[in-house]
Amino acid sequence: MSTAPNGKRQIQAADQLRIEMTGVGKAFGDHVVLDGIDLTIEGGQTVALIGPSGGGKSTLLRCLNALSTFDSGTIRVGPHVMKPEDSKAGGEPVRQVRRMLGMVFQDFQLFPHMTALQNVMEAQIQVLGRSKADAEARAMDLLKEVGLEAHAKKYPRMLSGGQKQRVALARAVAMDPMGLLCDEITSALDPEMKHEVLEVLQALDKEGQTLIMVTHEIGFARKAADRVIVLAGGRIIEDGPPEQAIDNPKNERTRQFLSRVLG
């Protein structure tokens, strides 16, 4: 990863992340959530996962870095392969995958007793072993990138929802992941705050960051993604660029879903 003249991180082709899911299945009792998912995501892609509630979107995302276990198939993230037993037992494959894939949640999950700056510093020190000075410099650079340099010493309770989410994104990027998994990160925000977060994601996209986003918001998916995947009933029923998957879907179930959410 190098730095461009404008100070932005530039992810080189050799650093980009390839993700493969082969025959991935997941069930809760008799309820099948993921039904033999086959999916390949090339490095540098921004992918939006959309579809009806209960279709398996968030479960797919959580299986990618073993926050949820899976029952069958394999998941390859870069050179690292996880099998069902790895997702259940943890161990080295899971640690390596989690190091490569950052996760950003809908509810921010910031430490309330830490400032924005401290939130972005903490895991760098505890997990990556960076010095306090290096972690602080990196955190300040990232807060500046997301437009929050002036809010570095504020606690989460003093920030808006959009600002909290931008801190959460900065914290995830501070760990130097090769990909980011974003689970409904704009659903609790008003339109203006959503725009703030969208701008950060678009900047990461331009830098070549691999982004996989679960969202119920079709307009957000159309603007932010270069590939849209529709899940329903635990299966992928549509996969293509936004102009195809959203504006000209092939699958009747996709058309039904979009007619309901778009009105």
Image (cartoon, rainbow, N blue to C red):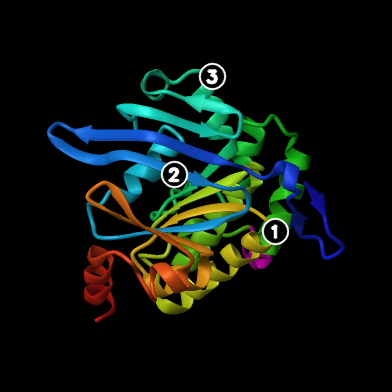
Q: CA distance from mark 3 to mark 1?
A: 29 Å
> Disc number at residue 92?
3
Which quadrant would the C terminus be assigned to in this image?
bottom left
Q: Is residue 255 left or right of residue 192?
A: left
Could you say which quadrant of the image residue 16 lies in? top right
Camera-near label (1 vs 2) is: 2
- Which residue is more in the foreground, 188 or 131? 188
- Determine whether the residue tagged by mark 1 lies in a helix, strand or loop: loop
- Which residue is more in the foreground, 123 or 22? 22
From this viewpoint, which residue is outermost toward the bottom?
Answer: 263
Tell me the residue at 66%/59% (across/down).
Answer: 143
> Disc number at residue 207?
1
Residue 98 x %, y %: 53, 33
Could you say which quadrant of the image residue 202 lies in? bottom right
Q: Is residue 36 above or below residue 79?
A: below
Q: Which residues are magenta?
A: 146-152
Q: Is residue 72 above or below residue 155?
A: above
> Disc number at residue 122?
none
Tell me the residue at 49%/60% (across/down).
Answer: 165
Q: Is residue 6 left or right of residue 27?
A: right
Tell me the residue at 37%/28% (across/down).
Answer: 73
Residue type at the position of mark 1: Glu
- Determine whether the residue tagged by mark 2 lies in a helix, strand or loop: strand
- Which residue is more in the foreground, 243 or 46? 243
Tell me the residue at 83%/65% (across/down).
Answer: 6
Residue type at the position of mark 2: Leu
Q: Is residue 91 left or right of residue 215?
A: right
Residue 112 x %, y %: 46, 49
Residue type at the position of mark 3: Glu
**Mark 2 neighbour class, 10 Å CA radius: few under 14, some 14 to 19, many 20 or more:** some
Label located before the other in sequence (2 or 3): 2
Q: Is residue 235 left or right of residue 62?
A: left
